[in-house]
Amino acid sequence: TILGQHVFPELEVGKAGFRSGRYMASTDEIHLTFLGKGGHAAMPHIIDDPVLAMAETLVSLQTVVSRKTPPEIPCVLSFGAVKAEGATNIIPSEVFVHGTFRTFDEKWRTRAHQLITEKAKAIAAAHGCSCKVVIDKGYPMVENHPEVTAAARHAAEKYLGKENVVDLGIRMTAEDFGSFAQQIPACFYRLGTRNQAKGITAGLHTSYFDVDEKSLETGTGLLVYEALQQLKS
């Protein structure tokens, strides 16, 4: 058995959250490089515009999620970085795009990678350009073992009080803990760090993130208690 505890600013300090089964998504990095014949922006008729190819591709790729994903499978495709070193009157020969793909189903994950690759290459070709697609496969989804999670939740209710233990929804964020959970019966749960009265409310991965330091005491005690209860069982 393996347990994982993660801070959670959406929960007040002194609370913990659990979810059995599928909890956090798998994650993959998507890297697209569009190559064309750049040139003067005033003469688009003699160039092959990779910026336009990129723009159409980013919009069209959203149909992989909205039109191809089975409705029972959560799925996200987002792009957060675009680099085209042209100017107001210069269309570059290269455009770089970077994004992330996340889901909860391995069969669909593989199929989606194929669709992303095929669509990006086809749209680029329609513009007289080419597209190099690199998909770096990342962490698998986090799936909490039902029996281990039930035992961990029961222990948390005894340690914190039943009123301080809550249900969690699925999250499209990802964790390397998913790799452990594929090998060992696992439970990955959340520890409340929020304190509304003190203004400690900022989300994870923000420049303002902070924790109520009471959570350090709560988290240490809870994880030790969880481990002892798992050993007893």
Image (cartoon, helix red, strand yellow):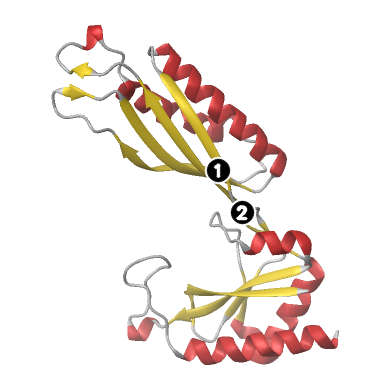
- Vertical order, 161 against 53 (above or below): below
Residue at 52% in and 23% down = 119
Q: CA distance from mark 2 to mark 1?
A: 10 Å
Query: Which image quadrant is residue 5 in?
Result: bottom right
Task: Assign a secondary structure to mark 1.
Answer: strand
In this figure, which residue is indicated by the disc labeled 2?
139
Residue type pointed to by label 1: Asp
Task: Please tell me how crowded label 1 is: few (under 14), some (14-19), or many (20+) other residues with Cα within 10 Å.
Answer: few
In percent of width and height, residue 57 lies at: 42, 26
- Vertical order, 54 against 216 (above or below): above
Query: Which image quadrant is residue 21 in?
Result: bottom right
- Position of 105 with respect to 97 (left or right) is right
Task: Please tell me how crowded label 2 is: few (under 14), some (14-19), or many (20+) other residues with Cα within 10 Å.
Answer: some
- Vertical order, 133 against 109 (above or below): above
Q: Quadrant of the C terminus?
A: bottom right
Which label sits on residue 150?
none
Residue at 74% in and 69% down = 186
In this figure, which residue is indicated by the disc labeled 1?
136
Task: Assign a secondary structure to mark 2.
Answer: loop
Residue 179 at least partly seen? yes
In percent of width and height, residue 41 lies at: 17, 18
In percent of width and height, residue 187 lies at: 70, 70
Residue type pointed to by label 2: Tyr
Residue 161 at least partly seen? no
Residue at 44% in and 14% down = 125
